[in-house]
Amino acid sequence: MSRNTMAPADRRAFTTLTLGLAQGIAAYSWGGNTVGVLVGATTFAIGAALYAREAAAQQRTLRPRNAPLSRAARYLSAFAVVLLLVRAASPDRDVKSFPASCPSGLQGRHGCSRVAEERPHRTPPPPLDAPYRARVLLADVEKAVLAWASASGGSRATVLRHVKPSSSGAGGVGFLHMRWTTRVMGFADDVFLRYSCSRGGSAVVETQGQLRIGVGYMGVNVRRNADLLRFLRDDAKLPAAAWCR
């Protein structure tokens, strides 16, 4: 074997190292997905151990007995590839305003939940079947929503766009676009929120959550919307205002 030729075992170790590093970086940048980072770090460590054992065996001109390590490298590498494909298949989109409706591909399916004044979709039963509405300040609403996202989603909730409401009195509109990832596989959901002042002087919060991949799983977006509305109505305890602004 020439010096520039890499043995199959060395190639396997190098591939495992590379996949582990790529998965760890991708998971960390993708909302700090703890399980994904752990998979990447473990894959990288096994690849490093496999590479070290192959190098030591070549120096002794012996065949290393590392079948369990090789199997672990193979399985973890395959899992890392799956996680990287999930990441690649769901890139972030530049959304500048609250969507007009659920995507056409998710109409009538579990993959989108919209609680809004217009074209609501798959909303839970009353009293969570309508947007939040109260005589409060938009600035207080904004703080409450961000606090809820931090407490509920932690590092898995990443703000992609944050448009603050206008400070020129009634009529201001705030907009949030967040990416939420699942704990294990790193599947991403888009969460959109619009908070504005109605003509009657109340603050109105509308929300829409939708999948990026697939058509539905276990009503996650429905429950997330319900949790946000429950938090605003019951837990946030926003101070009353004479007029929304």
Image (cartoon, helix red, strand yellow):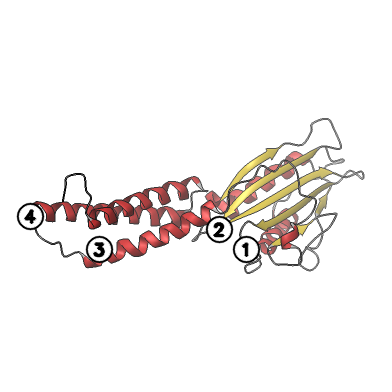
What amino acid is labelled 4 in the image? Answer: Arg
Q: Earlier in the sequence, mark 2 or mark 4?
A: 4
What amino acid is labelled 1 in the image? Answer: Gly
Q: Are marks 4 and 1 in contact (CB under 8 Å)?
A: no
Circle 3 SS class: helix
Distance CA(mark 1)–CA(mark 3): 34 Å
Distance CA(mark 4)–CA(mark 1): 51 Å
Q: Earlier in the sequence, mark 2 or mark 1?
A: 2
Reading the image, the residue beneath label 2 is 187
239 in relation to 169, above or below = below
Q: Nearer the viewer, residue 181 or 46?
A: 46
Reading the image, the residue beneath label 4 is 60
Q: Are marks 2 and 1 in contact (CB under 8 Å)?
A: yes
Reading the image, the residue beneath label 3 is 69
What amino acid is labelled 3 in the image? Answer: Leu
Reading the image, the residue beneath label 1 is 214
What amino acid is labelled 2 in the image? Answer: Phe
Distance CA(mark 2)–CA(mark 1): 10 Å
